[in-house]
Image (cartoon, rainbow, N blue to C red):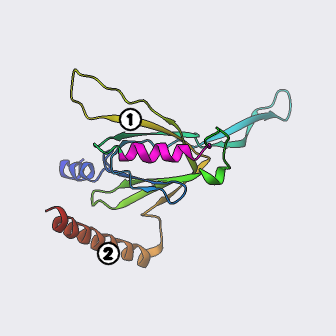
Amino acid sequence: MNINRFISQIDGMSRTNKFEVQLHGPSGLRSRGIRCTSVSIPPRTVGMIQHRYSSAGPVSNYANEVDYGGTVDLTFVLDHTYEDRQMVEFWQSNVYDGAYNLNYPEQYHGEIVIKQLGLDGLPTYEVKLWQCFPTIVGPISFSAENGDIQTFVASFAFRSWTSSFENAPSGLLGGLFKKFSRKLSSKLNKKLSDKLFG
């Protein structure tokens, strides 16, 4: 294989640190998860049952259930305002009232959107988790020995997830339009970022 072709393929690979998380909780609770440093897209597994048509015949496999993983962990770094921790705790407090009676699911269900970003900073793959709510707001540790950045982990339960791909086939004209609009969006985002932060 040509080394230049190999290097160009490596340069175009998806990166684990190029992602974005959006939290959409109840009562208009929203966060772009800018300080979310770690998350995994959950698995999806098709369960099977086996059946034999005769005692000596081969086993046939049939799908009988779909399992979406059920939980996902998000790791956040905390700034001095504890904004992300406050949001997750508030979301979790919607699960029950002051007398510890459980609320209806419509009062605490939300959504989580996880986006894989391309090298141009635009989404290439998106997973949306449905009927989410925080089940565990993890502990926060303190130590006088070092000055590390404070983090915490929150576990969210969910029912199912769906995915979408930016590069889904859409014909020749659709593909050209997507490619052009992606380049244009990338240039606009870069100019806007340079103006704001540059």
Q: CA distance from mark 2 to mark 1?
A: 40 Å
The residue furthest bottom is: 173
Tell me which label, 2 or 1, sits earlier in the chain.
1
- Residue type at mark 1 is Phe
**Residue 174 appears left or right of 146:** right
Q: Is residue 163 above or below residue 1?
A: below
How would you rate the neighbour count of disc 2 (Cα within 10 Å): few for under 14, some for 14-19, many for 20 or more? few
Q: In this figure, which residue is indicated by the disc labeled 2? A: 180
> Could you tell me which secondary element the residue under label 2 belongs to?
helix
Nearer to us in this view, 130 or 17 = 130
Q: Is residue 21 above or below residue 157?
A: below
Point 33% across, 47% down: residue:
35
Q: Could you say which disc has been placed on residue 152 in the image?
A: 1
Q: Nearer the viewer, mark 2 or mark 1?
A: 1
Q: Which residues are magenta?
A: 83-97
- Residue type at mark 2 is Phe
How would you rate the neighbour count of disc 1 (Cα within 10 Å): few for under 14, some for 14-19, many for 20 or more? some
The residue furthest top is: 145
Point 36% across, 41% down: residue:
76
Q: Quarter holding the C terminus?
A: bottom left
Is residue 96 located in the magenta-colored stretch of the structure? Answer: yes
Is residue 178 located in the magenta-colored stretch of the structure? Answer: no
Residue 41 appears anywhere in the view: no
Nearer to us in this view, 136 or 181 = 136
Nearer to us in this view, 18 or 84 = 84
Q: Is residue 43 above or below residue 131?
A: above
| Image location (x, y in percent) of residue 168 | 47, 64
Write down the quadrant of residue 48 in the picture: top right
Nearer to us in this view, 1 or 126 = 126
**Residue 14 appears left or right of 195:** right
**Residue 167 appears left or right of 100:** left
